[in-house]
Amino acid sequence: MGNDLDVVVIGAGFAGLYTIHRLRGLGFAVHGLEAADGVGGTWYWNRYPGARCDSESYYYCYAFSRELEQEWDWSERYPGQAEILSYLEHVADRFDLRRSISFSTTVVSAAHDGDRWVIDTEGGERWTCRWLVTAVGCLSSANVPDIPGLDGFAGEWHHTGQWPHEGVDVTGRRVGVVGTGSTGIQAIPVLAASAGHLTVFQRTANFSIPARNAPLSAEEAAGYKADYAAIREVQQASTNGHPFVVSDVDTLALPDDERRALFERAWERGGLRFRAAVRDVLADPEVNETASDFIRSKIHETVDDPAVAAVLTPHDHPFATKRPPIDTDYFETYNRANVSLVDVRADPIAQITPGGVRLASGAEHPLDVLVFATGFDALSGPLLRLGLRGRDGLALTEAWSEGAATYLGLGVAGFPNLFTITGPGSPSVLTNMPTSIEQHVDWIADLLGHLRAHDLDAEPTPEAQARWADHVREAADATLLPQAASSWYLGANVPGKPRVFLPYAGGFARYREMCDAEAQAGYPGFALRARRRAA
Ligand code: FAD
Ligand code: NAP
């Protein structure tokens, strides 16, 4: 096949694997480039203690193969990182995908030369292709805060998204965790169980719902397998790509005791479905306050020390306006004698010293291991790191200097024949991602089939992109989501990143219909040009 292809796919997680499978099946010469030495993406990199999904196993998986659905057995309600990685390795083997992927191959630049994409890798290889598909993930660019002194830390430090494969033995050691997002909230209880002492550095208190993880019984697993057609139908018609319907209950119309009982049932059932227990939780501030208040009351019931409970209680953003974590014994962990909580909003981290963390007040926290659960330069970050240059040398860093802009999250004006799976402006991180990924891959596959059949090049028009940016903004503004000022949805977690609400908040089903309408109308949002060949 050589290094000149129809399609190069960057990334070999959920998105890259399915793209390669789908396009190969359509007869495209396609090859994947992956920085890691194996498949799995998120599940290759995030090996921190406690890492698991919060979508449930029976739908945190591909839907494209009925056989795969029936063959694979999940062991738990929410499988851990190792099990999800095994699943993706199984997919790579079952569909014979590894022969179409170069591993340990990091793309450092990709430039359109007027005819083809020319892609250069860190190792000095060059690949060329007509169509470039990015499958680089939304949460694959680790965000390590720039805290003075980190280089001089005498202990070991790790970001959770780049966790060592051999693990980190924290037995009896003094461990610090910075960050209480979904990752920190998963890792903290597990680290606390073996650390000598665990210090949690919290900047923003978070709402968290119990996961209620448990083994999947044989009956449950068989039930899901028998029901897959119906499950997939609900997912396709849903707002978030999850197979459950948002309740129609108006919580404001309920007497206090009935409202409390309703939230109690949702709390006992656990998981992200809590968010769907009443209607309008992300649209009506009063409704949201009932859910937020309920969770606050649970924190105070769970945590023994009222002063610690107060610090753990969120007041600066409505529930679910930051991605809601789900947990196993998170708040309970603060009742352990070997765990302490430090409020770094009140007393910020000033410096990392050789021996630990020093706060602005001068207080010292001695540490042997420092864990950054500090998240990612989300959505746009991995794309900006690709060194993309489109027509006439336009750099993506330049095109996005005031914030990421795309058409449908699928392509960027000025970047011909580039397609971005779950790019900024798509529902992506607001959904169950395998569902969004498959929708994008199928849509891109249809478009590439059209372009091949008619020998066309494609790129979004600036007008379509501008209209889409307005719509993405309106969709976010119709919800409470922009109220979480420090959210990574807005880029607020990365210093200097332009504040643009990145994912599309209008709902998965509505979005899918708009993508289908675009295709049925002959792709009016894209400039389709007869193919230009280099002289
Ligand atoms: P990724 O899995 O991120 O894969 C992208 C790949 O691209 C990576 O392997 C990376 O190495 C590669 N890459 C990036 N840049 C380059 C480059 N320059 N050169 C070469 N290769 C490159 N989503 C849910 O829906 N439900 C969940 O429960 C859930 N849990 C999550 C838990 C964690 C800890 C995290 C971090 C995310 C979670 N997500 C969840 C989101 C998750 O990222 C997606 O579900 C999904 O795994 C994304 O797949 P992907 O293939 O799009 O991207
Ligand atoms: P995150 O949600 O961005 O959380 C990062 C945490 O680090 C926040 O508490 C943040 O505080 C804190 N932080 C960042 N920089 C800091 C600094 N300089 N000083 C002190 N604190 C700092 O990242 P994440 O927890 O890795 O989660 C990212 C996303 O990945 C999730 O939202 C979810 O989509 C996905 N994920 C899912 C699961 C799952 O259960 N399936 C697990 C992990 C991740 P502020 O809030 O104040 O910024």
Image: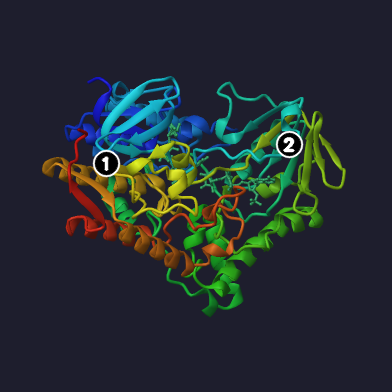
Residue 351 x, y percent position in the rendering = 78, 39
Label 2 CB sits under 8 Å from any ligand 2 atom: no
Between disc 2 and disc 1, whose residue precedes? 1
Residue 182 x, y percent position in the rendering = 58, 46
Residue 244 x, y percent position in the rendering = 39, 57
Residue 15 x, y percent position in the rendering = 36, 39
Asked whether residue 63 is in view, the answer is no
Give left or right: position of 476 versus 118.
Answer: right
Q: What residue is shown at x 54% (from left), y 63% (from top)?
A: 482
Residue 64: assigned label: 1
User: CA–CA distance between discs 2 and 1?
Assistant: 42 Å
* Viewport quadrant of the C terminus: top left
Residue at the right extreme, as displayed: 362
Q: What residue is shown at x 50% (from left), y 54% (from top)?
A: 402
Question: What kind of residue is marked 2?
Answer: Gly
Q: Which residue corresponds to mark 2? A: 176
Question: What kind of residue is marked 1?
Answer: Phe
Category of crowding for the residue at label 2, using alpha-carbon neighbours closer than 10 angstroms: few (below 14), some (14–19), many (at least 20): many
Residue at the front extreme, as displayed: 535
Of the pair 61 and 461, the residue shown nearer to us: 461
Residue 530: assigned label: none
Of the pair 365 and 336, the residue shown nearer to us: 365
